[in-house]
Amino acid sequence: MGIKAVIFDLDGVLVKTDRYHYLAWKRLLAEYGKDFTEEENEQIKGVARIKSLEILLDMKKIEMSEVEKINVLRKKNNWYLEYAMKIDEDDVLPGVREFLELVKSNGLKTAIASTSDNAYIILELTGLMKYFDVLIDGYRVKEAKPSPEVYRVGALELHLNPEECAVFEDSRSGVLAAKRAGMKVVAVSDNPIDEADKWVKNLEGLEMSILDFER
Ligand code: BG6
Ligand code: MG
């Protein structure tokens, strides 16, 4: 069975939003007198909002009540949006538009599978929304990646079987989510991700043959 749809993660695959998530977390930790390096940030890439906070509190040995957690998450998201509001067409990563046009002109369907609550606004700011048939975001699913839920719901809305969908993901938790959903996965990252079927550094110059997978 061939690939009939391509499902994309958003943050870090199509748009340079990672930097803004990082800066917002860094600003939050600075309020607790803690430093936060880009290397440490690797541990929360692609990880859901609440889970990211829990990892950071553990990493930095910070105690926090449940009420305070809700407040700081709100604060972090406001800062993220403050940075992200400046996003425009230029923040779309290299080769993204060209690849989306190629995929669509070959008659394949496209979807976004992101657990971010901010996915829609980022798609609007970058002008990418028009390329997608289906949008699954944080408001549509209960479980964060690496749960396969976001990809399973994506396949359902595309009216396809999981094995007919190929996924592009930049984080390990995202690759695991798509694999658990039964899909083929291309990792889009500086370094390979073991569980993925293929690996590219970005979408620049990709041809349709990237969607040929061994059965
Ligand atoms: C992922 C990002 O797509 O969404 C993570 O890679 C982020 O960095 C997660 O924490 C949740 O997003 P948001 O925008 O709802 O906080
Ligand atoms: Mg991502």
Image (cartoon, rainbow, N blue to C red):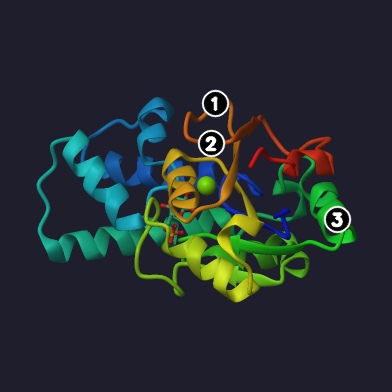
Q: Secondary structure at mark 2?
A: loop
Looking at the rendered structure, the kind of residue marked 2 is Ala
Under 8 Å from ligand 2: the CB of mark 1? Answer: no
Q: Within 10 Å of the Cα at label 1, are there few (<14), some (14-19), or many (20+) other Cα atoms?
A: some
- Identify the residue shown where x is 69% and y is 35%: 202
* Image x and y of residue 140, in percent: 46, 74
Under 8 Å from ligand 2: the CB of mark 2? Answer: no
* Image x and y of residue 136, in percent: 54, 69
Whether the residues at callouts 3 and 2 have beta carbons within 8 Å, the answer is no
Could you tell which of marks 3 and 2 lies nearer the N-terminus?
Answer: 3
Q: Quadrant of the N terminus?
A: bottom right
Residue 124 shown left or right of residue 75 in the figure: right
Looking at the rendered structure, the kind of residue marked 3 is Glu
Residue 47 shown left or right of residue 110 in the figure: left
- Identify the residue shown where x is 38% and y is 50%: 146
Looking at the rendered structure, the kind of residue marked 1 is Pro
- Identify the residue shown where x is 80% and y is 41%: 95
Query: Which residue is disc 2 drawn over?
Result: 196
- What's the distance in space between the residues labelled 1 and 2, CA to CA? 8 Å
Whether the residues at callouts 1 and 2 have beta carbons within 8 Å, the answer is yes
- What's the distance in space between the residues labelled 3 and 1, CA to CA? 26 Å
Q: Can you tell which mark lies on residue 192?
A: 1
Query: Which residue is disc 3 drawn over?
Result: 101
Q: Secondary structure at mark 3?
A: helix
Q: Within 10 Å of the Cα at label 2, are there few (<14), some (14-19), or many (20+) other Cα atoms?
A: many
Q: Residue furthest right?
A: 105
Locate ligand 1 by image quadrant.
Answer: bottom left
